[in-house]
Image (cartoon, grey):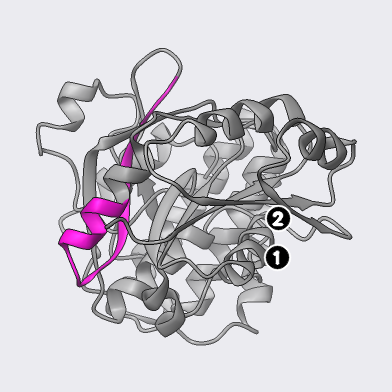
Amino acid sequence: MTPAIDVVVPVYGNWRLSSACLDSLAAQTVPSRVIVVDDGSPDDSAARLAAAQPWAELLVLPENRGFAAACNAGIRHGTGDIVVLVNNDVEADPGLLESLAAALEAAPRAGSAVPLLTKPDGRVDAYGLTADPTMAGFVRSAGATVEEALSGGGHRLLGPYGAVAAFRRSALEEVGVLDEGIFMYGEELDLALRLSTAGWATVAVPDARGVHLGGATSGRGSATQRRRAGFGRGYLLRAYGVLSGRYGLRALVTELIVCAGDLVLSRDLASTTGRIAGWRAGGRADRRARRVPGVDRSIGFVASLRLRVSDRKA
């Protein structure tokens, strides 16, 4: 018997993308409760979606509160044993939810499950997240072929990438939901780190597939995206006490190089100002554990820089 599944879809404008996403969720091979959270859209997305997909439950937030807050509103509204967060720019294959649910049912100590997402051109968009010892997170297998991603040679899997992320509700009840101190970018990494610290495993589900367009809200590589990603990085550096720990010097040097490189390439200070703001906000966050079992300690300084270069939003 398939466990009850809640699907939470945060929406901020782009109603055509959201409509296509919901159509793909309506075609799933197992039933689910789809909860759309309109995060203060600047257009008439909520009204259009309500008219076109009345079967989906709609929550409308009075103002734009950010990805984490929108997801949390949907999570709290539902009751399903499994919660699947789905970006509105994802089109899910029909068996996505069934595969994710089956994987979690087969692994009782898994707090999360990771699908294999591709880009429209067929190459891999993400096969979960990995993190180095400085708590910097990276998308696994980005740009690889599906065959390469499935070969098993990637970095250690920490948890799901935010575009599609499946969680066991009991795990979320234990460690808490997404940190709303982060508006967007970094919140899913933080949750994966907290789940790992609490002893929850994660499982890769290669048969769970979907296509992710990417960057539909902030614009891939835009100043807004880089500022928000920088904020998340600064926030987690402070919350996890990275700079005062064993890898503090490495983290500091890495961030200086990344910010300098972004200034040269983008000719703005978006990444730097984002990190400064995130660092300040991180001072108000709950302290996290510095040692996380799921971190990939084999990712060295040079490898980490290479991963940063391949992820321009960071």
- The magenta span reads 101-119
| Coordinates of residue 152 in the picture (x, y in percent) | 10, 39
Q: Is residue 89 visible to the viewer in this orientation of the structure?
A: no
Q: Residue at x 55, y 68 (%)?
A: 178
- Labelled disc at residue 277: 1
| Coordinates of residue 120 in the picture (x, y in percent) | 46, 16
Nearer to the camera, 285 or 160: 160
Nearer to the camera, 304 or 290: 290
Looking at the image, is 153 positioned above or below residue 272?
Answer: above
| Coordinates of residue 288 in the picture (x, y in percent) | 43, 83
Asked if the stretch drawn in magenta spans residue 47, the answer is: no
Q: Is residue 307 visible to the viewer in this orientation of the structure?
A: yes
The reply to whether dot 1 and dot 2 touch (C-beta < 8 Å) is yes
- Labelled disc at residue 273: 2
* Residue 165 as seen in the image, left or right of residue 296: right
Asked if the stretch drawn in magenta spans residue 102, the answer is: yes
